[in-house]
Every structure is written in C-alpha cells, then in structure tokens.
Amino acid sequence: MNRSIIDIMESQQLKQMILVEYSLIALEPSKKQRFSHALFGTGGRKSVLKLCQGRKIGKMALLIPPAYEMKLDDFFKVWDVIPKKTKVWLEDEK
C-alpha cells in the first residue's frame, strides 16, 4: 500500500488489521476440536489467538494485527487449514 495512504489512515485514527476466515470442513471431528482448543486455549493451555493479540469476531472469523500474520499462517499450516485473509482498516479504540 502506498505510504501516503497509510499515513492518512493512521492520522484518521484507523489501524490496519487482518480479517482471517477459515473452514474446518475437511477436518475430522476430533481434529476440529483439537484445532479449536489450540486456537482459543482451553484447560489452561495457551491460546494461539491470544499470543497473536487477535480476537474472534464470528464463527470461523478472526481479526489479528499484521505483525502476527506469519505466526498465524504457521499455525494454520500445521493443521492443513487454508485461511482467507483480507486487510481491513478499523477505527482505533484508544
């Protein structure tokens, strides 16, 4: 993206995030559950989503900061899940 556009967006108190959508249709039920436990954390396990400073915004949809895109990509590769990613600008909550 053009640097001047990024400057304008940031001056408008907007921040860039990545909308991540995914499907678990190809996974077996037990693997789906293990995937969800790893992504969201359960029973004291660390949450990959929390480590990526992301948040769940809907069924099979997440928002993450761009700095964690590669980390989340690595997570999805381990599970053979192919995410659809879209860069979005959100109003900064500060």
Image (tube, helix red, strand yellow):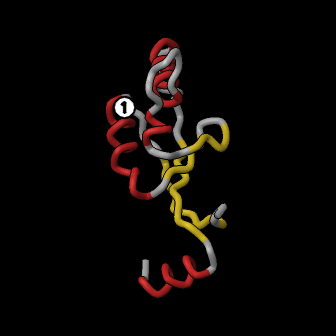
Residue 59 in the image: x percent, y percent? 65, 36
Residue 14 in the image: x percent, y percent? 60, 71
How many numbered markers are drawn? Answer: 1
Q: Does residue 71 lie above or below 35 as drawn? A: below
Mark 1, other Cα within 10 Å: few <14 / some 14–19 / many ≥20: few
Return the residue found at the far top. Answer: 30
Quarter of the image containing the C terminus?
A: bottom right
Residue 83 in the image: x percent, y percent? 46, 44
* Residue at figure coordinates x 49%, y 46% from the top left: 53
Instruction: Please state which of residues 34 and 26 is positioned toward the viewer in this rendering.
Output: 34
Q: Would residue 69 appear left or right of 49 to someone viewing this image?
A: left
Residue 13 in the image: x percent, y percent? 62, 74
Q: Does residue 13 lie above or below 56 as drawn? A: below
Instruction: Please state which of residues 47 and 75 is positioned toward the viewer in this rendering.
Output: 47
Return the residue found at the far bottom. Answer: 4
Q: Which amino acid type is shown beneath numbered disc 1?
A: Asp
* Residue at figure coordinates x 61%, y 40% from the top left: 56
* Residue at figure coordinates x 49%, y 38% from the top left: 49
Instruction: Please state which of residues 72 and 81 is positioned toward the viewer in this rendering.
Output: 72
Q: Would residue 50 appear left or right of 13 to someone viewing this image?
A: left
Q: Quadrant of residue 10?
A: bottom right
Instruction: Please state which of residues 71 and 44 is positioned toward the viewer in this rendering.
Output: 44
Return the residue found at the far front. Answer: 94
Q: Would residue 48 appear left or right of 42 to someone viewing this image?
A: left
Dot 1: what SS?
A: loop
* Residue at figure coordinates x 40%, y 50% from the top left: 68
Circle 1 sits on which residue?
80
Quarter of the image containing the N terminus?
A: bottom left
